[in-house]
Image: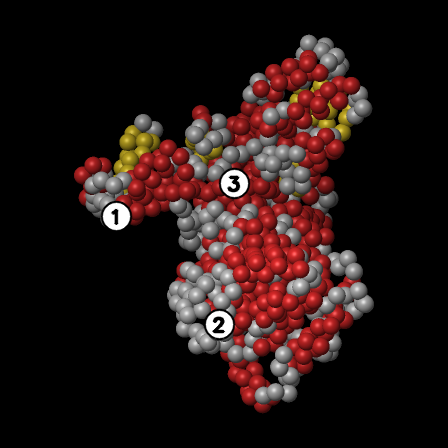
């Protein structure tokens, strides 16, 4: 490694130039610990640390950087002060969306510094594997040691070993030029080599980080970073100081360099991709909650560790979002460790300091689990509820009126015989109270709402509104989901009611049995914050043929066939840019573009036709209906916390998760009249755990009104089994409003199974008329 003294003046001038460039780009490095030993602390502490001999290299890193001075945290996606809705950017607030925008706008080839000539290295995968076999057999690891120590000694050597063709530049986003097979073989073998070999690799990486810290990055540098990120040694906490410096350098790269890394990363195999993501998540978790705090430098001296790792993780999230289907599930980016930190402090930091360089996990919402997001939304909701209730109380007292406890709630009074109209009137009349805690009363019926009446109101209302005869929504049997009816009408207030119902459900932690396609939730977040300008279009999002497949698979299949048709489209299909829809028995025509009825669909313009047709079906033809639905939802759920959510997560908050865990339900079930050791209960769980998934869903739907699970899991259902003193000839009965199953004491397992299956398979209708 070069010493701090070599080329001091030239390096200082280079650093100043770099500083100016970075400031222009807004890409700033995190602060470097002022004490030269701070970053090395994790390697120096403890005699057991196997890599402690490298502390001098880390010290050199810090000495070389002291001339640079402290800098701000790595580039973060910053949102402006969000106290005023007018200051908000359109909606691309997370790194995933920012990266997606930049992918489309940056050219495929960018000017880069000239690539230095690489050393000639001719070792192949077969040569390396032969060396490994010989070393294992003989115990002489010299050849392997030489290979590893040479290969990882510098970024140039890494490229010489792993670049597919050292004479080709590989300077496009399409091909990184990395020999992935060779990289995988070398890394897979590394952890099975002696300690001195592994130490030589880490020593070389430190050399590389020192050598490549200054000056503009070449594509060879980016290749080296891409390869080093896959090093399995970074799963070991004793390497975290080196890992942190690697992450810091990658986080501080320009957006153009990040653009290349994102595209190259999406070519990594699923297994390796997930390993890198898991390694980054583990790094963040162990820095937050170290098992052995003495292993790391004090948190105050390495505050840049977590921001750097999160920024690099954001690059992988961006890469994952570019692939359809994604390489790994979006849930694989969740870090459940964050469930245990002060999330509201993170949220308030994000709100209050959004336009500064203060780091908050909320700037990178992909890392926050749905359970943690629900906590943020609920607490934000509670604070809004309390604030509005307090204001009502203050207003009452200031007018010298007697306070009434009912003013602290959203009190909805409805008649069962006029459920929809009464609900519509109540919510329209009490717009100012929508953020208060919901309480429902059925006129003419005694009873306090302890949660059961509220759930019953939701169940009855949803069933009535979504009934096909009601005409608001069309049920598509092929996709088993509802979609908005395109029929025109004078008043769309009932669609606003459905939106408000969904908002109230999220606000009051009620899971609804609604079947909307994923596209609906994407539109619901377009944009996630209601625009101040009411002329701005809402609920309009980019839609594709895949979105249509999830709603009308047969029509989508026909359009797909049109796109792949090899004959003459114009002569064989004889279609124009005009579509027809039936409305109340009358066929109406709509042009997809001006004079569309006169423009034939041809082989050349069929892609445009399909895109316009899909956009018409999912956006334009239902605009007024969906806009009313959108405003209804946001009239209740208006919160900056919605900016943290993906469309899939909104669906889970509204409808619950489809993943069932009946064993978890068994553990959390409460009993009334039974003990969990009673024979009938043992029969019940033997039968239920042996059910197919379809029957388990039917049981859940029978007992709770929905076959999905709340965000908090089965425990949040508060499921109860009560003893029914009726004859064992009777079928089980459910009280869905209370998630309660009434079970007669059947004498044997066969009888219980038979009666239970009959009950849950014939449970349509609602016995409350």
Specify the farthest residue to the front: 138
Depth check: 169 or 493 in front? 169
| Residue 188 image position (x, y, % from top left) | 60, 56
Mark 1 and mark 3: span between their CA atoms? Answer: 37 Å
Please report the residue visible at 67 percent of the width from the left and 41 percent of the height from the top.
Answer: 712
| Residue 153 image position (x, y, % from top left) | 59, 72
Mark 2 and mark 1: span between their CA atoms? Answer: 51 Å
| Residue 299 image position (x, y, % from top left) | 73, 67
Quadrant in which the N terminus appears? bottom right
Q: Quadrant of residue 618?
A: top left
* First of labels 3, 2 by sequence position: 2
- Report the disc number at residue 120: 2
The residue that label 3 is drawn on is: 499
Q: Is residue 686 above or below residue 530?
A: above
Q: Is residue 225 above or below residue 137?
A: below
Quadrant in which the C terminus appears? top right
The residue that label 1 is drawn on is: 605
* First of labels 1, 3 by sequence position: 3
* First of labels 2, 1 by sequence position: 2
Instruction: Let me know if residue 170 appears in the view.
Output: yes
- Label 3: how many residues lie within 10 Å, few (<14), some (14-19) or many (20+)? many
């Amino acid at each position: 490694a070069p010493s701090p003294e070599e080329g001091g003046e030239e390096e200082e001038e280079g650093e100043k130039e770099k500083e100016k460039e970075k400031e222009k780009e807004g890409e700033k490095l995190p602060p470097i610990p002022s004490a030269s030993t701070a970053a090395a602390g994790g390697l120096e502490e403890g005699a057991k640390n196997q890599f402690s001999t490298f502390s001098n290299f880390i010290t050199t890193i810090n000495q070389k950087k002291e001339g640079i001075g402290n800098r701000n945290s790595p580039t973060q996606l910053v949102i402006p002060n969000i106290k005023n809705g007018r200051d908000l950017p359109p909606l691309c607030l997370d790194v995933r969306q920012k990266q997606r925008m930049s992918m489309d706008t940056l050219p495929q080839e960018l000017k880069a510094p000239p690539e230095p000539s690489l050393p000639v290295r001719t070792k192949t995968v077969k040569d390396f594997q032969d060396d490994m076999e010989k070393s294992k057999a003989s115990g002489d690891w010299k050849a392997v040691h030489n290979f590893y120590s040479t290969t990882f000694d510098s970024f140039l050597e890494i490229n010489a070993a792993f670049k597919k063709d050292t004479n080709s530049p590989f300077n496009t986003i399409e091909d990184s030029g990395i020999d992935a097979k060779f990289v995988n073989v070398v890394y897979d073998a590394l952890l099975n080599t002696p300690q001195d070999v592994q130490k030589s690799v880490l020593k070389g990486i430190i050399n590389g980080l020192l050598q490549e810290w200054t000056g503009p990055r070449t594509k060879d540098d980016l290749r080296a970073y891409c390869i080093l990120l896959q090093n399995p040694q970074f799963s070991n906490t004793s390497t975290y100081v080196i890992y942190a410096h690697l992450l810091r350098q990658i986080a501080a790269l320009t957006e153009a360099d990040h653009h290349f890394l994102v595209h190259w990363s999406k070519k990594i195999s699923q297994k390796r991709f997930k390993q890198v993501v898991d390694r980054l998540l583990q790094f963040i978790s162990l820095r937050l909650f170290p098992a052995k705090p003495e292993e790391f430098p004090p948190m105050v001296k390495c505050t840049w560790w977590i921001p750097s790792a999160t920024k690099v993780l954001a690059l992988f999230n961006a890469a994952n979002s570019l692939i359809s289907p994604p390489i790994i599930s979006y849930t694989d980016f969740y870090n459940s460790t964050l469930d245990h930190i002060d999330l509201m402090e993170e949220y308030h930091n994000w709100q209050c300091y959004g336009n500064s360089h203060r780091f908050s996990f909320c700037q990178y919402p992909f890392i926050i689990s749905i359970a943690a997001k629900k906590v943020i939304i609920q607490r934000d909701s509670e604070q809004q509820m309390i604030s509005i209730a307090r204001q009502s109380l203050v207003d009452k007292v200031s007018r010298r009126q007697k306070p009434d406890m009912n003013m602290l709630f959203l009190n909805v009074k409805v008649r069962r015989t006029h459920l929809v109209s009464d609900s519509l009137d109540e919510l329209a009349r009490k717009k100012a109270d929508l953020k208060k805690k919901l309480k429902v009363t059925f006129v003419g019926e005694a009873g306090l709402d302890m949660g059961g009446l509220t759930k019953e109101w939701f169940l009855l209302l949803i069933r009535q509104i979504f009934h096909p005869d009601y005409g608001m929504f069309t049920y598509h049997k092929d996709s088993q989901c509802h979609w908005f009816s395109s029929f025109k009408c004078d008043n769309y207030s009932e669609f606003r009611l459905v939106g408000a119902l969904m908002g109230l459900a999220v606000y009051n932690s009620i899971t609804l049995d609604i079947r909307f396609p994923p596209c609906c939730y994407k539109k619901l977040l377009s944009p996630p914050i209601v625009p101040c300008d009411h002329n701005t279009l809402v609920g309009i999002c980019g839609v594709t043929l895949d979105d249509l497949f999830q709603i009308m698979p047969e029509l989508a299949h026909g359009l797909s066939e049109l796109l792949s048709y090899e004959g003459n489209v114009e002569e064989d299909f004889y279609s124009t840019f005009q579509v027809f829809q039936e409305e109340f028995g009358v066929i109406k025509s709509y042009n997809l573009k001006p004079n569309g009825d006169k423009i034939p669909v041809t082989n050349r313009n069929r892609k445009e036709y399909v895109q316009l047709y899909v956009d018409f079906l999912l956006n334009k033809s239902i605009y007024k209906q969906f806009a009313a639905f959108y405003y209804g939802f946001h009239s209740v759920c208006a919160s900056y916390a919605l900016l943290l959510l993906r469309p899939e997560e909104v669906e889970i908050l509204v409808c619950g998760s489809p993943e069932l865990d009946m064993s978890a339900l068994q553990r959390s079930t409460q009993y009334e009249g039974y003990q969990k050791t009673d024979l009938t209960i043992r029969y019940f769980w033997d039968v239920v755990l042996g059910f197919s998934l379809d029957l388990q869903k039917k049981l859940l739907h029978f007992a709770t009104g929905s076959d999905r699970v709340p965000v908090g899991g089965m425990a949040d259902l508060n499921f109860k089994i009560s003893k029914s003193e009726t004859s064992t000839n009777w079928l089980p009965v459910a009280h869905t409003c209370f998630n309660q199953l009434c079970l007669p004491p059947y004498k044997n397992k066969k009888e219980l199974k038979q009666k239970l299956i009959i009950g849950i398979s014939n449970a349509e209708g609602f016995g409350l008329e």
